[in-house]
Amino acid sequence: MKILVINGPNLNLLGVREPGIYGKQSYEELLRSIREGAARLGVEVKCFQSNHEGAIVDEIQAALGAFDAIVINPAAYTHTSVAILDALKAVGLPTVEVHISDISQRETFRQFSYVSLYAEKTIAGQGFGGYIQALEYLKQRPVQQ
Ligand code: DQA
């Protein structure tokens, strides 16, 4: 099983960026933890990060026929991007949305997610562990006809 893991803007600054909210671990450490989790589960992962909405749309489009599922933390684009929502819907792959922080307990503008309108599951507030939970969910998910 091949899973594409997408991280949106400013997540490359993990560890530096608001550590009280996102923790002290870096993006490199997040990648290490995702790769370890994937190896343990026996799934193949590609990790992609971009600060640009169009680049994320391109990556989602390129997943068609190349990946079995998507894990996405769209970061700030969660709350603004119809383009990312439309790309996910166009490609139609099973998708899990992940947020490191619990967006339901933060500012009002973070409480609406466009991506949630398509994602099969949303995991928020579990730190880096949310990405591993997303991989576990996709691995055990029954294939729909
Ligand atoms: C985030 C939450 C978003 O509201 C924020 O813009 C982010 C990160 C999270 O992982 O908790 O950049 O997606």
Image (cartoon, grey):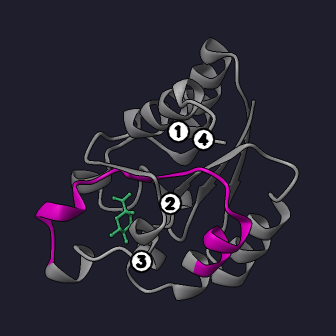
Q: Which mark is residue 28?
A: 4
User: Does the numbered disc 2 mark a residue whose Cβ is under 8 Å from ligand 1?
Assistant: yes
Ranked by sequence position, the earlier of labels 4 and 3 is 4
In this picture, which residue range is highlighted in magenta? 86-107
**Amino acid tagged 3:** Tyr
Tell me which label, 3 or 2, sits earlier in the chain: 2
- Residue under the point 70% across and 55% down: 48
Q: CA distance from mark 4 to mark 2?
A: 10 Å
Between discs 1 and 2, the one toward the N terminus: 2
Q: Quadrant of the N terminus?
A: top right
Residue at x 61%, y 38% (from the top left corner): 31
User: How packed is label 4: few (under 14 Cα within 10 Å), some, or many (20 or more)?
Assistant: few
Q: Earlier in the sequence, mark 4 or mark 2?
A: 2
Which numbered marker is on residue 11?
2
Q: Disc 1 designates what residue?
A: 30
Badge 3 or badge 1: first in the primary sequence: 1
